[in-house]
Amino acid sequence: MGEYSKALEYYEKSLKIREKVLPPAHPSLATSYNNIGQVYSRMGEYSKALEYYEKSHKIYEEALPPTHPNLAGSYLCFAGCYEKMGDYTTALKALKNAYKIQEKTFQEGNQAFASTFRLYGRVYRDLKEYLKALNYYEKCLAIDRKTLPEKHPNLAVIYSNIGDVHRLMGDYEKALAFHKKALSIQENVKCNPLECATTYMNVGETYREMKDYTTALTYYQKELKIREEKLAKNHPDLAVIYHNMSKLYFSTQKYSMAMKYVQQAVEIGQEKLSSTHPHLVEYRETFEKIRKKQ
């Protein structure tokens, strides 16, 4: 959490200096707003992130040509934020805008497309359109394999994303094979610990669905340790792991433990997410299921 506070402090100082010396529609100001927005997004403060993204985007639209890569990047920031907020329709609109610019600006196979395809995959996964999600993730992987070293952290992320979709489609063997590829990079190369935590979560979810609850719990605990160290106590990503643990304890008929974790998930969800966010809806449904068993 301290890393985010430091980053925010640094970017805000930088913004103050730029505001004093630059005209109000200067692209460097937009970059400052965008940087601050990205930190808020990582902190799970999505509404604040959007405010800064909007300020940044307004300047980019005024100051840059309509096919400038920074505008595409700005649309991707919107898409990522709306996806986290559970507004998948708006996320897809932003992705289309980013892709339109990238098509005009970059050659096919450029690394810039990888982020767009990965985000498309994430949104379609959220929408439960798994074949579409897989198609976009595979497009992203094809670009990453051509443009990045074989042990690059981005490859680990996309392997785990693909593994997660295979889990959701019921192919656990394939899911675990992709997660193993991800972890062989993440556990041996300097990676963002939160990306590694996501892989642990995906592995845990796979084992939970395979009814291997002991192994699932081991991976959930690895994930939880990282997230609790790195994130604020009310970060939406912590609600996800609490909810997963709650489902595991429900399946093993440990209802008081299940209730403990789902309550934490609901509390964070109510504070940080909109009342219609699919995650919060799911947390409440799990809460009701457990309550009926007690």
Image (tube, rainbow, N blue to C red):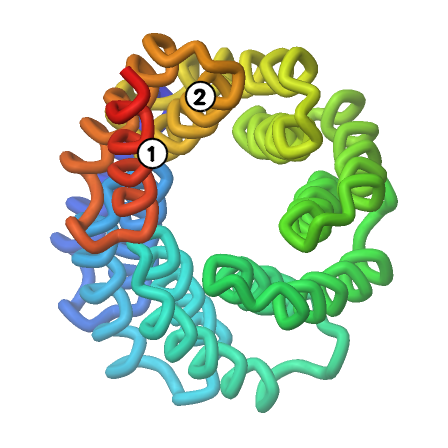
Pointer 1 local density, CA inside 10 Å: few below 14, some 14–19, many at least 20: many
Measured as percent of width and height from the top left, residue 272 is found at: 20, 39
* Amino acid residing under circle 2: Phe
User: Which residue is drawn at the image coordinates 25% and 38% (left, top)?
Assistant: 284
Please indicate, yes or no, whether residue 46 appears anywhere in the rendered image: yes
From the viewer's side, name the closer residue of 114 and 201: 201
User: Which residue is drawn at the image coordinates 63% and 20% (left, top)?
Assistant: 216
| Quarter of the figure that contains the C terminus | top left
Pointer 2 local density, CA inside 10 Å: few below 14, some 14–19, many at least 20: many
Label 2 sits on a secondary structure element that is helix
- State if disc 2 and disc 1 touch (CB < 8 Å): yes
* Amino acid residing under circle 1: Thr
Taking 168 as reference, is 166 left or right? right
Q: Which mark is residue 243?
A: none
* N-terminal label among 1 and 2: 2
Taking 266 as reference, is 278 left or right? right
From the viewer's side, name the closer residue of 241 and 65: 241
Measured as percent of width and height from the top left, residue 54 is found at: 21, 66
Q: For mark 1, what is the residue? A: 286
Taking 138 as reference, is 231 left or right? left
User: Which residue is drawn at the image coordinates 16% and 49% (left, top)?
Assistant: 275
Quadrant of residue 11 in the image?
top left
| Quarter of the figure that contains the N terminus | top left
Q: Answer above or below: position of 249 versus 288.
A: above
Measured as percent of width and height from the top left, residue 82 is found at: 32, 61
Q: For mark 2, what is the residue? A: 250
Measured as percent of width and height from the top left, residue 223 is found at: 54, 20
User: Which residue is drawn at the image coordinates 27% and 34% (left, top)?
Assistant: 8
Taking 41 as reference, is 196 left or right? right
Label 1 sits on a secondary structure element that is helix
From the viewer's side, name the closer residue of 4 and 83: 83
